Amino acid sequence: MTSAVDGGVPSHGRIPKYYAVKAQLLNLLSELGVGALLPAERDLAARFGVSRSTLRQAISELTVEGRLRAHRGQGTFVAAPKIVQPLALVSYTEALREAGHRPGRRVVTAEQVPAPPELGEGRAWHLERVLLADAEPLGVESTYLPVARFPDLLDGFDPTTSLYAHLAARYGVRHAEATERIETVLATPRDALLLGTNPAVPLLLMQRRSLDSAGVPIEWVRSLYRGDRIGFETRLRVD
């Protein structure tokens, strides 16, 4: 028989000391408010009656979860709520603006490479960009598109703007359906550098193959998102 769990506390009531401190810290974060500096470790350890190592474990988990943000040389601050994006065939630019944030992109790579299996044979454009939200790195997106279908893709296209809008305006191509897979991974040193994050922070890996209304592949996209700064939601219904 499985134990009933309420708020992370099992029915027998026994929890690790760091977890009790974590719950107390969450209450403190609500009192302090977004952007507030967390009190010094020694003060918090004395306040909760625990060792500094126990306190650090609680702070570490809250940082990984995106509740706290550590800035070297400045301290640890209460983080803003995560950005929530829809799981839908919409432009990153449009979705972020609707959520009240300022979208942006920083180009890392724009080149031709052998096409990935998801697009078939031939050559593909590879467009790698760091996705920004309010000038903060949120994800790294690698998009592959068939060169045969989009031979002059980069002509007149500003890679810091919406690719979906460019495909619709220049080629009349619109996304009709997609298959998407989501899983968690840890950041490589390169990923961490591009995202400005700690390699220990989990990332959300999303792989999407998009088709037009005729069932012809448009793109294959591999995206990495910071699990501490973004969440995704979708609406489910019975067909």
Image: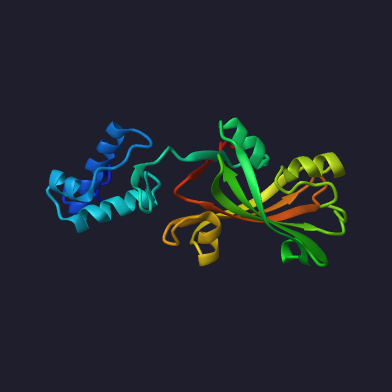
Residue at (56% x, 58% y) in the render: 194
Residue at (32% x, 54% y) in the render: 60
Q: Nearer the viewer, residue 66 or 217?
A: 66
Query: Left or right: where does residue 236 sit relative to residue 125?
Result: left
Q: Residue furthest front?
A: 73
Q: What scheme was used to colour the molecule?
A: rainbow
Where does residue 171 sit, x and y in percent of width and height?
A: 86, 44
Q: How many marks?
A: 0
Rendered position, 27 above or below 229 = above
Rendered position, 191 above or below 29 = below
Residue 200 visible somewhere in the drawing: yes
Quadrant of residue 134 within the rendered picture = top right
Where does residue 35 sit, x and y in percent of width and height?
A: 38, 37
Quadrant assignment for the C terminus:
top right
Query: Left or right: where does residue 33 sit relative to residue 229?
Result: left
Query: Left or right: where does residue 215 sit relative to residue 100?
Result: right
Residue at (59% x, 36% y) in the render: 102
Residue 10 visible somewhere in the drawing: no
Rendered position, 232 above or below 150 = above
Rendered position, 234 above or below 201 = above
Residue at (43% x, 37% y) in the render: 81
Where does residue 122 sit, x and y in percent of width and height?
A: 83, 67
Where does residue 23 sit, x and y in percent of width and height?
A: 24, 43
